[in-house]
């Protein structure tokens, strides 16, 4: 039976997308809204915890993080990167919203595939963002579970694109 489910999953290619239930989309959006304007602080926290991620950015590699944090270039990059979560969380969890999210995430996967960014680095990014959120928004088991499921869905699409086999 387990095998059958697995086989169906491979055939459907999207069975790892687990629909959000009840108020999970609202929980993600409302918690994100608490920090979505802290783009610079968020990218700073991610770089601080993961120097290997900072090192992949040609314009920031090898530079002192506290010095670059206050630059316009850092703000522009932070706005672009962190802004993706604002775009996704603003979408409705319905057919058209999911389709729009797929388009956006597939483009993200393709551009980062071109840069050779690994899944391990994306997982580090995810862990640091969750740490930031857990300490800076009103957090609880329900909010944590909503983010876990949302991230699983986003990363399922992302990692397929990163492998060069977008769904
Ligand atoms: C979910 C996590 C991430 C999001 C939402 C994100 C988002 C973005 C966006 C929107 C851009 C600009 C447009 C594009 O090229 O697609 C970008 C560029 C870039 N990203 Fe990411 N990214 C993520 C994770 C990472 C990770 C983990 C790394 C490295 C380890 C990385 C490295 C880069 C680099 C090097 C650029 C090019 C910067 C430049 O313009 O020179 N990204 N990212
Ligand atoms: C919470 O936010 C503050 C201000 O943006 C930041 O200094 C701190 O590092 C954040 N917490 C975590 C765990 O990232």
Image: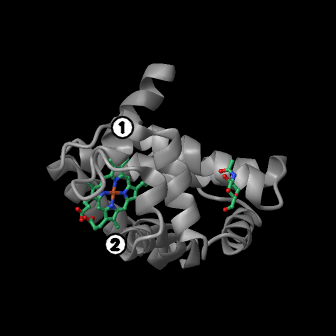
Comes first in the chain, label 2 or label 1 = 1
Label 2 vs label 1, nearer the camera: 2
Residue farthest left in this picture: 114
Q: Which residue is mark 2?
A: 73
In the depicted view, which residue is nearer to us: 59 or 17? 59
Q: Which residue is mark 1?
A: 52
Tally the marks: 2
Residue at x 44%, y 52% (from the top left corner): 65
In the depicted view, which residue is nearer to us: 141 or 116? 116
List x then y, in percent, for residue 98. 46, 69
Q: Are marks 2 and 1 in contact (CB under 8 Å)?
A: no
How busy is the neighbourhood of tag 1: few (under 14 within 10 Å), some, or many (20 plus)? few
In the image, is 51 to the left or to the right of 167?
Answer: right
Residue at x 39%, y 33% (from the top left corner): 120
Instruction: Report the image quarter containing ligand 2.
Output: bottom right
Instruction: Label 1, secondary structure: give it.
Output: helix
Q: Is mark 1 within 8 Å of ligand 1?
A: yes
Quick one: quadrant of the C terminus?
A: bottom left
Q: Is residue 139 shown above or below 93?
A: above
Instruction: Label 2, secondary structure: give it.
Output: helix
List x then y, in percent, for residue 13. 34, 45
List x then y, in percent, for residue 75. 43, 73
In the image, is 141 to the left or to the right of 16?
Answer: right
In the image, is 145 to the left or to the right of 119?
Answer: right
How busy is the neighbourhood of tag 2: few (under 14 within 10 Å), some, or many (20 plus)? few
Corner quadrant of residue 42: bottom right
Q: How is this picture coloured?
A: one colour
């Amino acid at each position: 039976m387990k095998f059958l489910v697995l086989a169906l999953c491979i055939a459907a290619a999207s069975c790892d997308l687990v629909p959000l239930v009840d108020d999970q989309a609202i929980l993600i959006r409302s918690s994100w809204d608490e920090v979505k304007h802290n783009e610079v602080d968020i990218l700073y926290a991610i770089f601080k915890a993961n120097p290997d991620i900072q090192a992949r950015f040609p314009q920031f590699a090898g530079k002192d993080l506290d010095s670059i944090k206050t630059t316009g270039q850092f703000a522009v990059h932070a706005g672009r990167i962190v802004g993706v979560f604002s775009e996704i969380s603003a979408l409705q969890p319905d057919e058209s919203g999911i389709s729009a999210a797929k388009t956006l995430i597939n483009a993200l996967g393709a551009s980062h595939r071109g840069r050779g960014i690994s899944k391990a680095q994306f997982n580090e990014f995810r862990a640091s963002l969750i740490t930031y959120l857990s300490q800076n928004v009103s957090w609880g088991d329900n909010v944590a579970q909503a983010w876990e499921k949302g991230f699983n869905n986003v990363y399922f699409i992302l990692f397929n694109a990163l492998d060069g086999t977008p769904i």
